[in-house]
Image (spheres, rainbow, N blue to C red):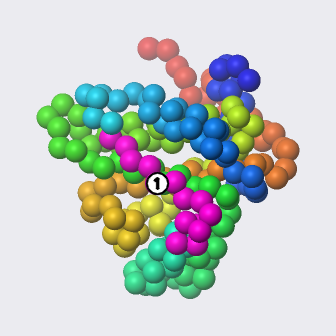
Amino acid sequence: MDAIELLTTRQSDSNLSFPGPSQAQLEIIKKAALKVPDHGGLAPWKFIVVQDEGRERLGEIYHQAAVSEHQDERTISRAKELPQRAPMIIIAVSPYQEHPKVPRIEQIESAACSVFAMQQAAFAQHLSGVWRTGYFAQSPKVKSLLGLNEQDEIVGYLYLGTPTVACTKPVRHTAETFFSDL
């Protein structure tokens, strides 16, 4: 797959199954994560790879957070199962670093670029994935149980695996709608 095809055909896919990325594929995904824009050379990213038994541990973390933070019954009941939706999850974190020229938002944006780069690298290797956020990315308890600091930002959970259905999603947007000249 060439770069133009990758950039214009990539899509998210939440219907994922085994196998997940092989070790060789994961190494390419990791390299892609580190080649994103990085103002000031801060490397404002940290990644936690979750697979095998780690998926159960992450489910327990989600469950503990949902219970202790008094989430609704649906969130609590689904918590343990959410990490089972893919063979691998990469948790992308932006650990904030005080810097006179690189504001917090730029550090988070750099980490977000890394998630996109990892998803692109997976897609280029005939894998698929979906970038998830929501309550478990914002939960102070989840951050604590993952050993993160309060100011760290969980940019997202990148679920990766083999797509279970081959369906190309329809084009939702056109360039004319979002681009204009000055």
Q: In the picture provided, is 13 more to the left or to the right than 52? A: right
Q: In the picture provided, is 58 more to the left or to the right than 172? A: left
Residue in the foreground of this view, choosing between 9 and 170: 9
At which x and y percent is residue 95? 30, 49
At which x and y percent is residue 69? 40, 80
Residue 104 vertical position relative to residue 82 in the rendered view, above or below = above
Crowding at dot 1, Cα within 10 Å, few <14 / some 14-19 / many 20+, comes out as: few
Q: Which residues are magenta?
A: 44-57
In magenta stretch: residue 93:
no
The answer to whether residue 119 is seen in the rendering is no
Residue at 78% across, 41% down = 169
- Residue furthest left in the image: 100
- Residue furthest front in the image: 23
Reading the image, the residue beneath label 1 is 48
| Quadrant of the image occupied by residue 16 | bottom right
Residue at 76% across, 56% down = 17
